[in-house]
Image (spheres, rainbow, N blue to C red):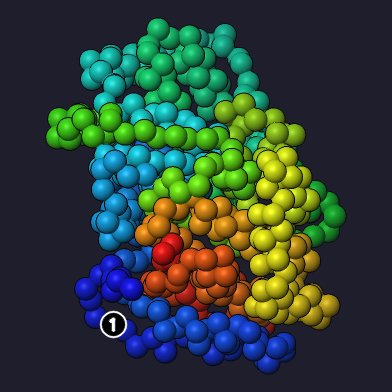
Amino acid sequence: MRDFKLFEDYLYPIDNWKITSFSADGFFCQEERMKLEEKYIEITEVTDKFNRQSVSYQLSKKDSIHRWLKYKEGFSADLVKILLNEFNIHAGATILDPFLGSGTTALVARLQGINSIGFDILPITNVSIAVKSSIFQYRLEELNNLIRDIENIAIPLEFTLKANYISITKDAYPDNREIELCFITDWNEKSTYSNEIKNLVTLCILNSLERISYSAKDGQYLRWDYRSPKIQDAEKKRLQAGKEPFATKLDKGVLPSLKECLLNELKTVSTDIKDIQKNIDSTLFEQTELEYINGSALYELPKKADNIINGVITSPPYCNRYDYTRTYALELVYLGKNEEEVKNLRQELLSCTVENKSKIERLKDHYALLGKENDYNKVISIIENNKTLKEINLALEARNKNGDINNKGVLKMVNGYFSELTFIYFELFRLCRKGAYVAFVNDNVRYGGEVIPVDYLSTELAEQIGFTPVKVYTLKQQKGNSSQQMKKFGRIPLRKSITIWKKN
């Protein structure tokens, strides 16, 4: 096996990142998780050459084109560049990302002449990919004219159009911001600018929604400024019921105008476009193909032919209860999604929220329709016979009966998460050519005092499918647990990892 090493750096003593207790207070059996820890700790390497910024959106804030969509769940372009180099993937090859998000993997690849295939269910990705793929098509003169016209926009007093909303987004904007949002959106749609420019304005508006609203993205949910009518109504009802007022209040201060935010966004984008068009040869980019499919990789990957890709770089939604349809509710509604469509989209997500229902029966029907019943049965057999996943499921059931889990939906979420990822891993193995490397960025998690080693369990499932485990890179910075768990069970540092597998 090739000596696979991303970084030349100081090797930290791995014992500090090794988990020695998976079940707090020895509550439940941890034998299988301990076996897994002993097995894969041998290929685990801690490095400080990348950090939380590398595996998140943080570094992209300063990176041309990749900063155009503020997608906090993404990873950095630098990480993709390093992995493409180490995987020895060159121009003409094909890389795949089953959870495309803002499109970082695809865009970095295209700029290096590498073809890409990507999937995502969120319409935000549609806009991001369309806008970023047009990087060499924008005319600077048209962009300058656009900025000038927006600077001169004045909203007529008689304009009273209101924004659409769903229950989550009700009372999201002050009245003046809502009118401004509707007017500029209408202005953009009716303008005579090119479709590329109109899409660019849409993306810049998407990037501005949170700033002009009473909301703030906060993990699993949106937090709300105390000035939002919905919060004021809720506070009034609490007081009438004899309850204490809300303990904490969010105050976002003066909310900027959409015009101000939009101009700032467009000026940043304009600078990036000018820089890229001047300093980067468009030949490689224009010769490559980006096949983007707005759909779930769970159902789209099985339709693809065997042996068509040279590598995978991705980060799935983490098993952390974060609900993208809630945190990105403003953006989804702005793009036209109604209440029912948002609920349906929530069920299409990889099972990472307590509201997700099982997709197993639907997958069974889907594979049968494709004439791939044998593939379905192989994956189900791997899932059902994995001893580590069985132990985790039983541990969570016991914790739930003991009152240690605050939402029993966590049980089906965790099982669904790994079941669905196993289908993804199986299809990626089939699509990979021999010699292809696969990189998954993910976090370990803890529920009810039970540690779930996402990195090692994923690696075991991938190995059972046929991949060869190569390396598990772990960030020097580990993460903690929820405050409730730390208070009850103490703190267990959890790994943030990049797992590397190979198809031999």
The residue indicated by pointer 1 is: 11
**Within the image, what quadrant is residue 227 found in?**
top right
Q: Is residue 489 left or right of residue 184?
A: right
Q: Is residue 300 above or below residue 377?
A: above
- Quadrant where the N terminus is found in the figure: bottom left
Furthest residue in direction left, as rendered: 279
At 50% across and 87% down in the image, what residue appears?
38
At 71% across and 62% down in the image, what residue appears?
380
Q: Is residue 348 above or below residue 28?
A: above
Element under disc 1? loop
Given residues 257 and 61, the one toward you in this image is: 61
Given the image, on which type of amino acid does mark 1 rest?
Answer: Leu
Furthest residue in direction bottom, as rendered: 26
Decide if residue 93 is in sight here: yes
Q: Is residue 153 left or right of residue 388?
A: left
Given residues 362 and 16, the one toward you in this image is: 362
- Give x and y (percent) for residue 334: 57, 29
